[in-house]
Structures are given as C-alpha cells and as structure tokens.
C-alpha cells in the first residue's frame, strides 16, 4: 500500500484550496456533494484526518466517521424521498478506489431506478448546490 498523498483532491478540499458543495462539517468529518453523481443526492463523507482508506484508518477515525455517514444517509434519503440508500466505500485501485483519501459514498435510491453510469462528466454546479441545500435542510430538521 502506498503512503497518503497530501495533494489528493479531498485533502485540497479540506484545506480550502478546492471548492465543494458542503452539506455538513464538524471537527472530524466533512460531507459534500460528489461532482460526478451517479444518483440525485449522491454525496461523500470523509474524515478530516489524513487517511488513505479503511486499510490504514485507526479505530478512532472510523468511530467518528460512521455516525456521520449514518446521519447523512438518513438526511439524503429524506431529502430525495428515496426508498433506500446505497453506501459504498472502496479501498486501493484494485478495489475501485480513485481518490486516495478515505471517503464513503452515500447514494439515495429509488426502487426500479438504476444508478447512472460513471462518465467522468461533472454535474451542473447549480444543481449540485440545490441538492446540497436539500440534504442540509433535511439534516438540520432532525
């Protein structure tokens, strides 16, 4: 396994060097919209600690991350009136990981609607901003 690269895109987002459509932030985690969503409301939850993936995450990082994943999942499901939620987390290139800062995908799902293909095309920023606002409102209403 390679070392953590502090120049990965999520590290840059955490340092404020790259923008994101933020949903929620606390001392240990950040939740924001995926810029190439495979479903409406597709968002990411990341630890603020420099962790490549679950293979090098310590228990404290996971203990802080997973409750936020659950909170964001509930809010995303409510915000998009979804029937369920897909939660994904990939580790190393062979496991499908593309950005090497630990992150958890949260995808609201509607029965019978397939995920969109990953095309590499970025979504409309105004739409992402609206989706972030919907999830944030659902999170804040709880």
Image: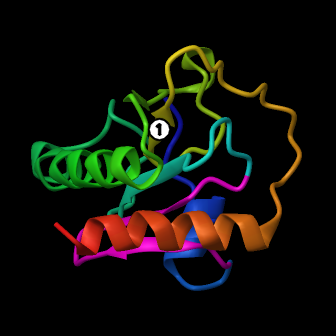
Residue 6 visible, this orientation: no
Residue 81 in percent (x, y) is at 42, 44
Span shown in magenta: 19-35
Residue 111 in percent (x, y) is at 50, 18
Residue 113 visible, this orientation: yes
Residue extending farthest to the front is 81
Observer-nearest of 134 and 50: 134
**Residue at the spot x=58%, y=14% of the render?**
112
Tell me, what colour scheme is on the image? rainbow
Q: Is residue 93 above or below residue 72?
A: above
Q: Is residue 116 above or below residue 10?
A: above
Observer-nearest of 135 and 95: 135
According to the image, label 1 marks what residue? 108
Q: Is residue 129 above or below residue 65?
A: below
Residue 28 in percent (x, y) is at 24, 69
Q: Secondary structure at mark 1?
A: strand
**Residue at the spot x=22%, y=45% of the render?**
70
Residue 10 in percent (x, y) is at 56, 62
**Residue at the spot x=33%, y=75% of the render?**
25
How crowded is the residue under tag 1: few (<14 C-alpha within 10 Å), some, or many (20+)? Answer: many
- The mark total stands at 1
Quadrant into which the C terminus falls:
bottom left
State yes or no: residue 26 in magenta: yes
Observer-nearest of 54 and 113: 113
State yes or no: residue 53 in magenta: no
Residue extending farthest to the bottom is 16
**Residue at the spot x=68%, y=35% of the render?**
38
């Amino acid at each position: 396994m390679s070392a953590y690269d502090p120049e990965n895109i999520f590290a840059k987002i955490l340092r404020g060097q790259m923008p994101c459509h933020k949903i929620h932030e606390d001392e240990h985690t950040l939740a924001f919209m995926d810029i190439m969503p495979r479903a409406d409301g597709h968002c990411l939850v990341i630890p603020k600690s420099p962790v490549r993936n679950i293979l090098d995450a310590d228990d404290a990082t996971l203990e802080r991350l997973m409750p936020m994943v659950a909170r964001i999942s509930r809010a995303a499901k409510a915000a998009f009136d979804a029937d369920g939620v897909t939660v994904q987390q990939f580790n190393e290139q062979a496991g499908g990981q593309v950005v090497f800062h630990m992150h958890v995908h949260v995808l609201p799902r509607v029965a019978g609607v397939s995920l969109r293909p990953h095309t590499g095309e970025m979504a409309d920023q105004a739409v992402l901003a609206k989706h972030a606002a919907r999830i944030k409102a659902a999170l804040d209403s709880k």
